[in-house]
C-alpha cells in the first residue's frame, strides 16, 4: 500500500525536512516517512509497540539458560572471537559493540512474537539466536529476505565496523533530527516507554547504518546509509520472519488429549504451523512423551511407545491438520 499525498501535504513535509539540514535526497526521506505511515495505517506499528510495552522476557536474565544464549549464536561467538565482548562494551553506548548485536536479537524476539501472535518460550528465543537471520540483515539490509547464503560472512566485517565514523557533524545531526521526526510521527504522546523505545531503536538504526557503510566498502556514514537503515528497520517490522528462524530448535512433539495421538515435528516445522487435531482436539507442544503424560487424558504410559509411534504415523493424515507450512 502506498500513501498518496496531495500537494499541500508534500509542501508541509518539505517544510519539516528543511530542519534536517542539507545534503540528503528529499524523495528518499519522504519514502521513509511513507513506509512509517504504511505501518501505522495497517496497525502494524501499534501492534509492535504494544508488544514492546507489555514485554516479559521469555528467559529470565539471571538464569543459566539466559547465560547460555550467546553460545547458541554463531554470530555472537564470532563477534567475541573478534574482541567484541560484553566486558569491553557498554550497553548504553551509541557505538557498535557486542551489545549492538545482542540488542538486535532482542528486537527480533518482539518481531517474532508479533508474527506468532503469542508470547515466546525458551525454544522460540533459541530459534532466533541460533539462526542466521541477523547475518542476512547485515548482508542484505532492506533485501535481507532475498539473501540465500551467509557462508561468506567473515571476520573482516568485525574489523571494518571498528573503523566506521560519521562523515561530518552535519550527517550525524541529520541522523539525530530524522530520528526525532520519525518518533514524533510514531506516537501521539511521548511517555517513559516511548523514550526508552526511541533510545533502543536509535541504537539499532545506527548499527544498520554502519552495516550499510561497510557493505559499500566505506568508512564514513552518509545520509544514504542512514536512510537505508530506516528502510531496513521498517521492512523488518512488517516481515513475517518465522521462515528465517532456526526451526531445528523445536525438538519436541505435539499431542492431542482427545485422540491421544502425537506428532514429532520435522526439522522445518514449528508448533505454530499446526492449529488443531483433525479429531477436533487441541494440540499441546511438549518436550517429550514423558512430559506428555502430565496432560489431560494422554495415556502414553499404558501403551508401548514403539507401537504408539507406528500407529500414529500410519494415521497421521487423520490425526493432524497442517497449516502455514514453509
Image (cartoon, rainbow, N blue to C red):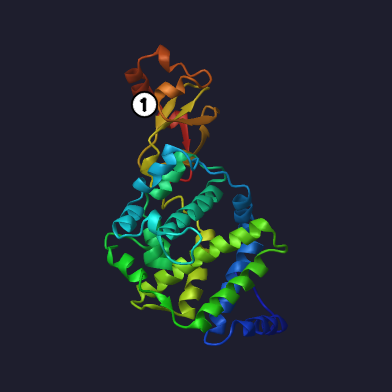
Image position, residue 149 (x, y; %): 31, 60
Image position, residue 33 (x, y; %): 60, 73
Image position, residue 21 (x, y; %): 58, 85
Q: Quick check: 257 above or below 146?
A: above
Seen at 36% across and 42% down, the residue is 248
Question: Is 278 on the left or on the right of 265, as rendered?
Answer: right
Looking at the image, can residue 238 be seen? Answer: no
- Would you name the residue on which mark 1 appears? 314
Seen at 51% across and 75% down, the residue is 227
**Camera-side residue of 24 and 296:** 24
Q: Quadrant of residue 314?
A: top left
Looking at the image, can residue 288 be seen? Answer: yes
- Residue furthest toward the bottom? 22
- Residue furthest toward the top? 302
Question: Is 126 on the left or on the right of 179, as rendered?
Answer: left
Image position, residue 25 (x, y; %): 53, 84
Question: Is 43 on the left or on the right of 307, as rendered?
Answer: right
Secondary structure, mark 1, is helix
**Camera-side residue of 255 and 45:** 45
Amino acid at each position: 500500500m502506498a500513501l498518496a499525498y496531495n500537494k499541500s501535504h508534500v509542501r508541509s513535509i518539505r517544510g519539516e525536512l528543511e530542519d534536517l539540514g542539507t545534503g540528503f535526497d528529499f524523495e528518499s526521506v519522504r519514502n521513509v516517512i511513507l513506509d512509517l505511515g504504511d505501518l501505522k495505517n495497517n496497525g502494524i506499528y501499534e501492534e509492535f509497540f504494544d508488544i514492546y510495552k507489555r514485554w516479559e522476557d521469555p528467559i529470565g536474565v539471571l538464569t543459566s539458560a539466559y547465560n547460555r544464549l550467546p553460545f547458541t549464536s554463531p554470530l555472537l561467538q564470532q563477534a567475541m572471537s573478534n574482541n567484541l565482548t560484553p566486558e569491553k562494551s557498554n550497553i548504553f553506548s551509541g557505538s557498535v559493540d557486542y551489545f549492538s548485536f545482542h540488542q538486535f536479537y532482542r528486537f527480533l524476539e518482539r518481531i517474532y512474537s508479533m508474527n506468532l501472535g503469542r508470547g515466546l518460550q525458551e525454544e522460540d528465543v533459541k530459534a532466533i539466536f541460533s539462526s542466521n537471520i541477523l547475518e542476512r540483515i547485515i548482508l542484505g539490509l532492506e533485501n535481507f529476505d532475498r539473501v540465500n547464503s551467509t557462508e561468506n560472512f567473515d571476520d573482516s566485517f568485525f574489523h571494518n565496523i571498528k573503523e566506521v565514523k560519521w562523515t561530518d557533524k552535519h550527517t550525524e545531526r541529520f541522523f539525530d533530527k530524522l530520528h526525532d521526526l520519525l518518533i514524533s510521527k510514531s506516537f501521539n504522546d511521548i511517555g517513559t516507554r516511548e523514550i526508552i523505545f526511541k533510545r533502543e531503536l536509535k541504537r539499532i538504526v545506527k548499527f544498520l547504518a554502519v552495516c550499510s557503510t561497510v557493505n559499500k566498502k566505506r568508512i564514513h556514514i552518509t545520509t544514504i546509509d542512514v536512510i537505508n537503515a530506516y528502510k531496513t528497520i521498517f521492512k523488518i517490522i512488517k516481515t513475517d520472519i518465522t521462515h528465517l528462524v532456526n526451526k531445528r530448535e523445536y525438538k519436541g512433539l505435539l499431542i492431542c488429549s482427545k485422540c491421544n495421538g502425537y506428532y514429532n515435528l520435522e526439522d522445518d516445522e514449528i508448533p505454530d504451523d499446526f492449529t488443531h487435531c483433525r479429531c477436533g482436539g487441541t494440540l499441546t507442544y511438549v518436550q517429550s512423551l514423558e512430559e506428555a503424560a502430565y496432560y489431560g487424558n494422554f495415556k502414553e504410559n499404558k501403551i508401548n511407545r514403539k507401537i504408539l509411534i507406528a500407529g500414529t504415523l500410519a494415521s497421521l493424515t487423520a490425526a493432524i491438520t497442517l497449516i502455514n507450512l514453509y
